[in-house]
Image: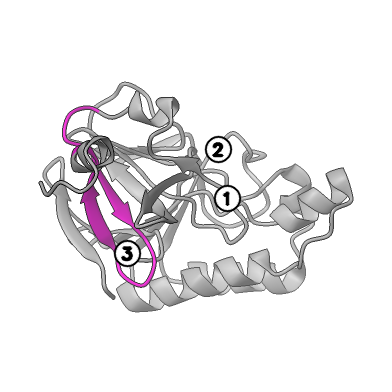
Amino acid sequence: MNAYNFTFCGTACQALPTGALYLPDQRILCVSDLHLGKSDRIARRSGVMLPPYDVQATLEKLENDIAATRPETLICLGDSFDDLAAAESLDEDARLWLTRLQAGRRWIWIEGNHDPGPVDLVGDHLAQFQTGTLTFRHIATDAPAEVSGHYHPKHRLAGRSRPAFLYDSTRMILPAYGAYTGGLTSGAPDLRGLLGTNPVAILTGRKAIPVPLTETRRAARFPGRSW
């Protein structure tokens, strides 16, 4: 899977190259910020027409990750839908697709700031979820051992920006999983203010690649030097 294996707050983790987080010991797969129906919402509000393939592309990616990891529990970490109308206008094929993905496992919808709250879909609708030492919620707080989303972090390496996991010793922020999602650079004050010492970015793409952010800052200040 070209995943990156690491330990976070005593829990074994795998950062998948797709932007999903897998906890092998608990058999939990977590994805954040699917923003299903974003092309529909943009068309409704602005009249700008995007190819309406975001739902299909996102669910295809999720289906592949489920097939690869076979989780017992799947956590959607908030902003699973772009707004209430997007959730309500999800077509029957997409609803059936979601139902197939949910079959045989626990499915947890964490509330996000875009989410309409409980909708007519199977699963547990929660403000947060805790397992072992970890707490899963949409927006980061000051709590320790926290996994969150919301910010759609990205990180630039070798001139290319990619969606990225960001984590330190107490907090992890997942990248956006949805097909039509933007992102916030890892150096943005909102993100850097959340991270403590020795933060790491894990870049997504063909392979999950860890990059210490402290080394990135030094390389930017002293180009050409080897650390």
Q: Position of residue 39 (x, y in %)?
A: 74, 57
Total marks shown come to 3
Residue at numbered disc 1: 80
Label 2 sits on a secondary structure element that is: loop
Q: Position of residue 67 (x, y in %)?
A: 39, 78
Left or right of 207, for residue 65? right
Q: Which residues are magenta?
A: 196-214
Q: Label for residue 112?
A: 2
Q: Amino acid at mark 2?
A: Gly
Mark 1 or mark 3: name the one nearer the start of the chain: 3
| x 45%, y 40%: residue | 185
Mark 2 or mark 1: name the one nearer the start of the chain: 1
Mark 1 and mark 2 in contact (Cβ < 8 Å)? Answer: yes
Q: Amino acid at mark 3?
A: Leu
Distance Cα–Cα, label 2 vs label 1? 8 Å
Left or right of 60, for residue 155? left
Mark 3 crowd level (few <14, some 14–19, many ≥20, 10 Å Cα): many
Mark 1 crowd level (few <14, some 14–19, many ≥20, 10 Å Cα): many
Q: Label for residue 16?
A: 3
| x 49%, y 38%: residue | 150
Label 3 sits on a secondary structure element that is: loop
